[in-house]
Image (cartoon, rainbow, N blue to C red):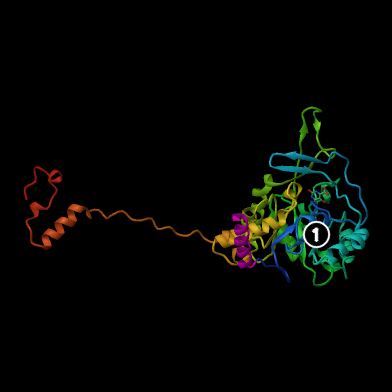
Amino acid sequence: MSVTIRRQERQIKHVNVDMSTKLGNLTIADPVFTASGCAASGQELAAFNDLTAIGGVVTKSIQLNARAGRATPRMAETPSGMLNSIGLQGPGIDIFLNRDLPWLAEHEVTAVVSIAGQSVEEYSKLAGKLRGKPASMIEVNISCPNVEDRGQVFACDKSAAASVIQAVKRAAPASMPIFAKLSPDVTDIVSIASACMDAGATGLSLINTTLGMVIDTTTMRPLLAGVTGGLSGPAIRPLALRCVWQVHQAMPDVPLFGIGGIRTGLDALQFILAGASAVQIGTVLFNDPGAPQRISRELSEALAERGMDSVQQAIGLGHRPPEVIVPELPDPPGDTLEDELYESAVADDEDITDVFIEDEWPEDQDV
Ligand code: RRO
């Protein structure tokens, strides 16, 4: 019985908070999306979530041609996170457009299509193929860490990042929002963010995984076949949050997706307070595939508990100046009990020798 009541209360709270958010020209009913790469094109998650009730699904980065990815082992557990070295496995854009995107459209799921190319030209072709297709947004993955050549991590170089975004902008459907997904593995993420915005991006997805590795102490060799991999999960949450904070501080009007180790509604709230307009949920899906809807519900409750009735009220709120706390001042010197008694005695024309507390009266003082 008590469980039912609690559920009802939760639902009421959820309804009372306006969860809608703006991503460029789109208004999305909920700020929680699934992140690219953790659930293919989202079909598997439909058994655990009503995918129409969350913001949408960001599909696994798709390339022009099918790709088998890197050799195994390509996943490893790490403290509070995991490493992946998938290497852009996927069926290629044509199969994706014929098989996966229609499924999302038929099920009325908001689809954010993640594209990844090996050259500026490939990105342009991929974006062009989305014309007339039921995609709501494009996420331009310029930050995959699992590529043969670090030169292909376009997000590590301002002008390379800008060239890709410019080409995608030209080729993509005119009104489709374009989000550039950035890497944390740079010295100054704000300068990369700014180059992408100048090149025509609508917003930014912060962040992709960060490059890491594990050595197996039994074989005494790297555990991943690809040697290095992308680190994700709660281990990178503070790093991701810092990136969102810095970019929002420099460009407060740019819509941001916050991504990195979000497991709960309060984690999501941190990203929104730092300046994210929406969040993406990734690694947690591997042990809690129902996390997107749970996190959305927890976020709405957290907002309601803090007296907010919309997500939009909370975006960037962490940047407001701290409230000035005026300490309670101690009584001014002289404003002691004795003084008060003295003043009232004088006012009442009493004999002031009567009003002092005996043991506090200086012995040698003659009144
Ligand atoms: O496929 C991958 O190995 C991969 C990609 Br495309 C990405 O963007 N980030 C990541 O950690 N892995």
Specify the segment rendered in magenta: 1-18
User: Could you tell whether 69 is left or right of 45 in the image?
Assistant: right
Question: SS class of the residue under badge 1?
Answer: strand
**Picture coordinates of residue 1 (x, y %)?**
61, 56
- Mark 1 neighbour class, 10 Å CA radius: few under 14, some 14 to 19, many 20 or more: many
**Picture coordinates of residue 201 (x, y %)?**
76, 65
Q: Quadrant of residue 4?
A: bottom right
Residue 274 in view in this figure: no
What's under tag 1, amino acid-wise? Val
| Secondary structure mostly seen in the magenta stretch | helix
Q: Nearer the viewer, residue 220 or 40?
A: 40
- Residue at point 78% right, 52% down? 143
**Picture coordinates of residue 104 (x, y %)?**
84, 63
- Tell whether position 313 is magenta: no
**Picture coordinates of residue 246 (x, y %)?**
64, 56
Q: Nearer the viewer, residue 240 or 345?
A: 345
Q: Which residue is mark 1?
A: 140
Q: Nearer the viewer, residue 50 or 125?
A: 50
- Tell whether position 10 is magenta: yes
